[in-house]
């Protein structure tokens, strides 16, 4: 089991969702984050105060997948999230020791197989 | 708007017009809230500013030449420069209130009308060209149209009825909005991604404040604290209430649910529809107008969303369709038993309906044409649309260098003093 | 409310009642904000809609038959249908303002009273049954009670004093709220989880706007721009100020801290308490009433939270207790030196206090009983409470298909055209 | 403010002053919103409460002795206690409106002036000492200064012009703000971290509501529904519009972008600047005053941010500088053709400018000195600043035990009943 | 050392907190996330626009625990977060190489032992 | 490759950013979280309801770094985020199997090297 953690542009989220659905990945968790990287930073002014935004809005996906699904998942994200401009984000693949489905207590592979779908 | 004016000042009339002018002024920030709630968070401030800026630009335009072009004697087509820079606009009576007050009250209409247009082009227009557009539009479209209808121009001579601005304000702004939306093109992700209202409570609050302000808009158009003002006020209370009811019904039939955005929109549509009729029809007719107006705007709005016309906040469906329906229905329901003189179809004067239709068509065509000319002129000088990158980033940061809702995290102070500051280290 | 009415129109009086009607209308969106800020984000729109819908439903009910039932001559118990559909409600003088304006002004009271009830049942009532309840309640409870007190009915004959609606509005709504909260039962997690206000700034802003609107509610009840209006207005300014001070003190004693929700609540309680007394007591008595009213509501509210009675936004503690205290104290402080005719206990008329108590009890009992009957009738037809799953999901999404604050993430456009759209692919 | 007063009540004048008092009251919640939007979310409620509390504390102070000290006959320096507890303040005419109404209208000025001060010391002052400060400041600073200028005191005798409170309200509050900010010292992270507005839409809405309320502030200062009121009202409409335009220009020149916070600030600065002049200058001069006032405040604000003076929301730059500019310019532009009697430099009376300067200097010095004395006295009794830990935590939680925006997550109900509740288990 | 990452229903958070306290787990980090899985999706309508919400509100807990605590932690969550309806969420157990307590610089087991508690 | 996950006080974020920049770490992702630990809890009152806040606002940083950068990164955070009071937070170091840069598809070390910087 692996946890694929992808950081992408917010405006690419819908495209990535569809790409994941097409790759038959139907379980994941999304959160709003902010990232610092190579992007040119915006300056903002509030009355006499000028600030430089070191962080840009990003969206993070956490996707628990069984080993054979790692590659298709990563490829789907790479394809759907790319714009070619600096700031497209990163994907991290982390090892997972155990997965449980809370509703049933099922473990590992069974735990990430969506209801009523053979993945 | 009544044209017979006795010649001495009346304290009560002054108070009512003062209050009404204040109320109409409040409509512009209220609109900023209403529109702002309907866009995405990253474009909130830009959307608010497109209304708020009219309080600067349009008001100054109005007092310099706008008022004179609209209400100066001039010809049947346009006023003149005789009152430019408020020359001769003093504290003497015009009707029963000081001339200066009349000018100011009309000025608040000018501001809100310009601001209305912005709803069609949010989330993608450059700010400078937008400001230029509304300034020019005010002079070349609003001022003449206002002259035609309220300044003694040709539409007034035809006997068209427009109590508080169905044609002058709503149809007029909607035509410009429609042209602007067409010319700019849809938002990049329009029709592909869901572009949702980021703050519906602001939409509801905005609608509430607009309703409150609209009492000044319609009620104040009587320009006196008299029966006419009462009639206009009460009709402004009743019509939207019927629109809300019918709209909720239509919502329920279509989706099985009553929505808050729908109810707020309905209130505005009802207010738009009663605007041309407020002091001219009976209260029961006002209920009817409110009820009737719901359906056309509702379906226009649903239909529009399936087209490629990204009139983003449905200025045309709400103000255009609502304004047309109201302006036509005043030709049906106008009742001399209530307004003292004017009669519509139901009171034996079918020709009024034709006059109404003509006036709407004229205003729509003129506004659309000249708006298009202004846009084309601006386009020759500069680009009027932001870059795709700015659009993705959001116009608040891209154009104004501000965020509507900031928690300050990751914002690093840029010190402009000689101080060897962290900001400098950060750059290292 | 005064009953002697001269017969010609007065411009100044018209303006004041126009302005007041506008102000009272604003109270309904203000209440939507005040109540909405106090619930959880997932129920924000539903809570706002429970107030906003009254602007549609209640207004239409009022003009169709409500007004006639409340102010038609009828009997000591209820009006009649003589003015149904505004028959005979015209621009002629009723007092010194047009009859139509009087009707509209009273209509805004009808709207806000219905909306007040919703605070007791937020976050769990189904929307349709709620709307049916307030429509029926308006006809079967508000209209008769209003007739009793202001329409020349039996409570008026007794000589009970209720300047702007202590009994008619606040006690009346609170009784219904109490019955509704009891019948519906508490929210699923009530008393187990913390159910906190999601937006306190809206609560404070809502209280500010309510106060502003209340000047029209109390001041306008003089129905003229006279000394009485001034007295009512100033008392409406002073009483809440005293309530806020005392409430802050009570807060400090109890928890060591002054709270914003507390201060906003105190303002409303002070406004409620002065409502029946506004034009009847001296300004110093208004301060006293405001100060006295703080404690009962404060403790009612703290005590209520420890019971199983989930009157979620404390309609009973604020409007019921506040209204009762105010309605009793008018029997103590009423001062003919200020109001011209009516005297209370302190001015030698102890029986007034008894009359006040009787009127409160009658209104409370009647409202509670008939409200219960309406609920039971509705329950026979349909379920009035949402399912536990809908409650967990939040009523905004579950009932209205909307989110108050959406960032649009993960929302996929459903295209209804023939377009082979992503939405279709997604379903694959 | 005019001093000649005819002696009978006028309905129209009563309405206008009633409305104006309501509008000025609304300015305090509006200010709470404006200020609140400019601070960080964790200090939102504390900031709002610093305005809102004035509605309790200052109003009560006013009716007990404040009004009497300000408007009692007394000496050239201060009033007396003759009207303490509203003794003799009744419904008889003072001018053309009841004395009670005059008192209430002036009371709303007292409230907002106290609230203005808070902007200088947000995010770090303890709540109790702050409340004590504004109560004492009201009595020892506002009341005498008000007496000097409007109560027939020595500045009035000099012939200084202050139509609606350039010196009494704005310069006066700004001096106190400046002293308080100096004494308290800057916020811990000031000049090191970015301390950004957390809710700019509230800032814009707050500015809109302030503008709306300001019509009552300036227009109502005519104390009658007459030409003067119209002039003051229209000037209050025009001046900020010019300020917004010029401010946007300055913003563009400095940073290349127009900002929403800037536009909202500009509106307030324009309103401040026109306040002393509203009923005294021509509309075109009002535009000029608005335009001229933009630059000094703009640069004061930019410059201030580079100093160690943490006048956090720039009370001095907006109200101090704006008020001084306006109070001086009234000495330049005052025009007897419009105000009936008073002339400034441009109308041949250069000495007026000197009188204006003197009055500003006197008010500033007196307010600064006495404010400093009050702060030092308070400091001897208690600490007036929160601890660094409380400052880091945010004042809402630390001082008020509330969060402005809570999603309730991780909040565990503390049950005070005997119930063996989860809260008890949690402690295990 | 392990990192237990649990995704649960927001309305179950309080119950899970108490379950963790009872299991003597007193350090964790919580964040708001949104998840996609087998849940039936809600439709929403805004004027003419109809959308399907592919994401449901969830809460994520990150709990760093020493090895003997993994099982009790997982069991506590499984018990407290279950409703039995689709959408109850998942638990992932991830390996951790090192833990530091910032305040003291303590490492590993010591770093996750709450102050003044023997866990 | 490792993922350094740090939970810190919000008011320390700017200091930590600068510390990371100085340590030549220029890619990371930030999110708002809330944490429970040894901190004394605040009580809040809303009308008649009293609650105890079991969670305090924190900020989480996720930093993907190649192995030689782990130690400097951790040290930078330890130094910059410390106040000495309970509640300073934790750092977890997690193993990462693979990293991708979405823009280019680059993997691992190359994926976390910021544009135009030799790290
Ligand atoms: N080393 C890293 N660890 C964690 N997140 C990172 C790292 N580097 C970049 N990110 C995330 O990826 C986003 C994009 O990275 P950036 O360097 O700007 O662009 P690109 O990946 O296209 O070169 C950042 O905003 C940040 O959220
Ligand atoms: N493979 C996964 N990786 C990460 N998170 C997941 C995954 N599958 C489900 N989740 C999270 O768990 C939540 C519940 O999952 P769901 O499939 O709807 O229900 P259940 O676990 O009861 O079958 C989702 O909303 C999502 O946040
Ligand atoms: N075991 C843990 N797993 C995950 N996060 C933790 C853990 N323990 C503490 N934290 C996070 O670290 C923060 C600070 O921890 P706390 O115990 O309060 O202080 P300290 O680390 O100074 O002893 C907590 O608010 C929480 O966000």
Image: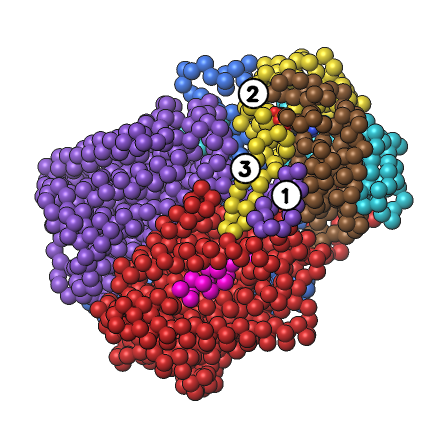
Chain colours: A brown, B red, C purple, D blue, E yellow, F cyan
Query: Which quadrant would residue D278 be assigned to in this image?
Result: bottom left
- Disc 3 to disc 2, C-alpha distance: 19 Å
Q: Residues within 10 Å of mark 2 (few under 14, many from 20)?
A: few
Rendering coords of residue C399 (x, y %): 45, 38
Query: Which quadrant would residue C135 be assigned to in this image?
Result: top left
Q: Is residue A25 left or right of residue B311?
A: right
Q: Are marks 3 and 2 on the same chain?
A: yes
Q: Nearer the viewer, residue E15 or C59?
A: C59
Tag 3 subunit: E
Q: Is residue D118 left or right of residue D59?
A: right
Return the disc, 3 or 2, that comes first in the chain's sequence. Answer: 3
Q: Are marks 1 and 3 in contact (CB under 8 Å)?
A: no
Q: Label 2's element?
A: loop
Rendering coords of residue D101 (x, y %): 27, 57
Q: Label 3's element?
A: loop
Q: Nearer the viewer, residue E46 or E92?
A: E46
Q: Is residue B82 left or right of residue A112?
A: left
Tag 1 subunit: C
Residue position marked by numbered label 1 in the rendering: C424
Q: Which residues are magenta?
A: B312-325
> Is residue C185 among the parts visible in the rendering?
yes
Residue drawn at (29%, 56%) of the image: C20
Residue position marked by numbered label 2 in the rendering: E84
Q: Residues within 10 Å of mark 3 (few under 14, many from 20)?
A: some
Residue drawn at (63%, 43%) of the image: C424
Q: Nearer the viewer, residue C340 or D380?
A: C340
Q: Are marks 2 and 1 on the same chain?
A: no
Q: Label 1's element?
A: helix
- Disc 1 to disc 3, C-alpha distance: 16 Å
Residue position marked by numbered label 3 in the rendering: E42
């Amino acid at each position: 089991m692996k946890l694929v953690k992808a950081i992408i542009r917010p405006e690419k989220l819908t495209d990535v969702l569809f790409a994941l659905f097409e790759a038959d990945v139907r379980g994941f968790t999304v959160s709003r984050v902010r990232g610092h990287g190579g992007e040119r930073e915006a300056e903002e002014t509030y009355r006499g105060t000028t600030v430089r935004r070191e962080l840009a809005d990003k969206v993070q996906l956490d996707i628990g997948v069984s080993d054979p699904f790692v590659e298709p998942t990563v490829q789907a994200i790479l394809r759907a999230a790319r714009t070619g401009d600096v700031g497209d984000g990163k994907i991290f693949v982390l090892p997972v020791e155990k997965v449980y489905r809370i509703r049933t207590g099922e473990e590992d592979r069974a735990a990430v197989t969506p209801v009523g779908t053979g993945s | 708007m009544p044209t017979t004016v006795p010649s001495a000042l009346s304290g009560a009339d002054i108070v009512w017009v003062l209050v009404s002018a204040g109320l109409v002024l409040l409509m512009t920030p209220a609109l900023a809230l209403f529109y702002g709630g309907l866009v995405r968070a990253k474009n909130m401030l830009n959307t608010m500013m497109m209304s708020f800026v009219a309080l600067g630009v349009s008001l100054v335009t109005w007092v310099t030449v706008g008022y004179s072009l609209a209400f100066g004697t001039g010809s049947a087509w346009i006023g003149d420069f005789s009152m430019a820079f408020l020359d001769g606009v003093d504290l003497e009576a015009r009707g029963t209130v000081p001339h200066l007050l009349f000018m100011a009250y009309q000025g608040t209409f000018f501001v809100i009308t310009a601001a209305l247009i912005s709803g069609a082009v949010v989330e993608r227009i450059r700010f400078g060209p937008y400001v230029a557009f509304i300034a020019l539009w005010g002079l070349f479209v609003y001022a003449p149209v206002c002259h035609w209808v309220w300044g003694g121009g040709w539409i007034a001579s035809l006997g068209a009825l427009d109590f508080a601005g169905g044609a002058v304000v709503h149809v007029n702004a909607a035509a410009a909005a429609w042209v602007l939306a067409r010319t700019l093109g849809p938002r990049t992700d329009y029709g592909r991604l869901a572009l949702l209202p980021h703050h519906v409570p602001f939409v509801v609050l905005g609608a509430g404040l607009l309703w409150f302000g609209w009492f000044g808009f319609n009620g104040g158009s009587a320009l006196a604290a008299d029966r006419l003002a009462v009639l206009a006020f009460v009709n402004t209370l009743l019509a939207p209430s019927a629109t809300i009811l019918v709209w909720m019904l239509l919502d329920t039939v279509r989706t099985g649910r009553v929505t808050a955005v729908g109810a707020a929109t309905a209130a505005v549509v009802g207010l738009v529809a009663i605007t041309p009729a407020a002091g001219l029809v009976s209260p029961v007719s006002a209920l009817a107008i409110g009820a009737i107006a719901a359906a056309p705007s509702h379906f226009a709005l649903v239909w529009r969303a399936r087209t490629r016309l990204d009139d983003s906040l449905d200025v045309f469906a709400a103000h255009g369709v609502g304004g047309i329906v109201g302006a036509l229905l005043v030709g049906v329901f106008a009742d001399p038993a209530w307004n003292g003189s004017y009669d519509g179809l139901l009171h034996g004067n079918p020709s009024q309906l034709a006059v109404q239709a003509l006036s709407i068509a004229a205003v729509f065509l003129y506004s659309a044409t000249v708006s298009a000319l202004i846009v084309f002129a601006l386009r020759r000088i500069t680009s009027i649309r932001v870059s795709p990158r700015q659009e993705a980033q959001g116009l608040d940061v891209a154009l104004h260098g501000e965020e509507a809702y900031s928690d300050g995290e990751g914002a690093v102070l840029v010190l402009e003093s000689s101080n060897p500051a962290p900001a400098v280290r950060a750059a290292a």
